[in-house]
Amino acid sequence: GYDAEVYHCAFDPGSLDMIVIPALDFCIFDSTAPHEYFPELPGDEVWDLYDAAVKEGVDEFYASELECFQKAYKGKVAQATEWIKTAKNLYGAFSEEIWKNIPSDVWQEEKNRIIQEILPQI
């Protein structure tokens, strides 16, 4: 019965990264790389589900497989970061070209129209 904010992982939309319930001043989230959080505020609590759900020694048993996954993950994050930078630069160049070709009187007229639409009482 509470409103909740649900945040999915940017790299895996099927994975939940965080759930916030504002009315309860409560949030639960995945604190693994690349978004680790180390609580330091009064009232912060850590419920380590990993310790509760994973048998001791599993990480050591699968160490080589985990290392391969971690390297692949870091490689994909680096690749995604480069694609995002490229997209940002292309968008910036595109926007600059568009704005440069709009006459200032047209821009001013449209700006005034938008302001009147948002704030008609002014």
Image (spheres, rainbow, N blue to C red):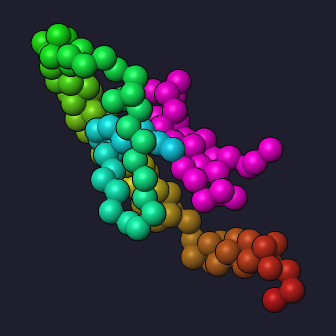
Residue at x 70%, y 71% (from the top left corner):
110
The answer to whether any part of residue 103 appears in the image is yes
Relative side of 119 to 42, left or right: right
| Residue 69 painted magenta | no
| Residue 24 painted magenta | yes
Measured along the vertical axis of the image, is residue 58 above or below residue 118?
A: above
Relative side of 102 to 88, left or right: right
Residue at x 38%, y 66% (from the top left corner):
41
| Residue 79: x %, y % from top left | 25, 31
Residue nearest the viewer, comparing 82 with 27: 27
| Residue 91: x %, y % from top left | 42, 49
Quarter of the image where one finds residue 34: top left
Residue at x 41%, y 67% (from the top left corner):
42
| Residue 94: x %, y % from top left | 43, 51
Measured along the vertical axis of the image, is residue 108 above or below residue 98?
A: below
- The range drawn in magenta is 1-27
Residue at x 64%, y 78% (from the top left corner):
108
